[in-house]
Image: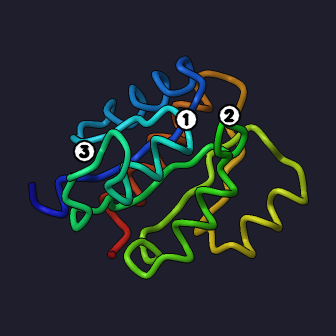
Amino acid sequence: MENNLLEIILVEDNPYDAMLTVRALKSKNFINNVIHLNDGVEALDFLFGTGQYAGRDVGVTPRVIFLDLKMPRINGLEVLEKVKSNPATKTIPVVILTSSAEDPDIKKCAELGANSYIVKPVEFENFSKVVADLGFYWVALNKA
């Protein structure tokens, strides 16, 4: 697998939000490879080739990580901190895609190096448009 084939990692514990996000990302037919990981533990295992992903080629990195904050086991802030503090992953863009509009979360994410912070719109149409636009920007327009 070439590096550019792994486009988006979605770290989202809510199955409904994950399904809507993947559907919105694929709706414009410019994103082919979205990997959904259920929580922070799965995300870190995937990114660092440990646990259930032991042996995965960690040199194959995503173009962008869409990361929820409020998750069980390991939350999004902890994932963000580990990703941005490791030389092998710190240049991967991380977009916080969460329902939290709390100022402390926004500030902490900025301090830890998040590339963007997006509050999920509640309405389906708005949610789909925001996610599709994010995917287009980070995969098609943004230069790594």
Q: Label 2 near label 1: C-beta < 8 Å?
A: no
Q: Quadrant of residue 3?
A: bottom left
Q: Identify the residue position indicated by label 1 in the image.
A: 12
Type of the residue with mark 1:
Glu
Q: Which label number is shown at residue 30?
A: 3
Q: Earlier in the sequence, mark 1 or mark 2?
A: 1
Gap between marks 1 and 3, in whole Å?
21 Å
Gap between marks 3 and 2, in whole Å?
31 Å
Residue at 58% in and 69% down: 115
Side (left or right) of 42 relative to 16:
left
Residue at 53% in and 20% down: 15
Q: How is the image coloured?
A: rainbow
Residue at 50% in and 32% down: 38
Q: Earlier in the sequence, mark 1 or mark 3?
A: 1
Is the residue 38 above or below the residue 138 in the image?
A: above
Side (left or right) of 134 relative to 35:
right
Type of the residue with mark 2:
Pro
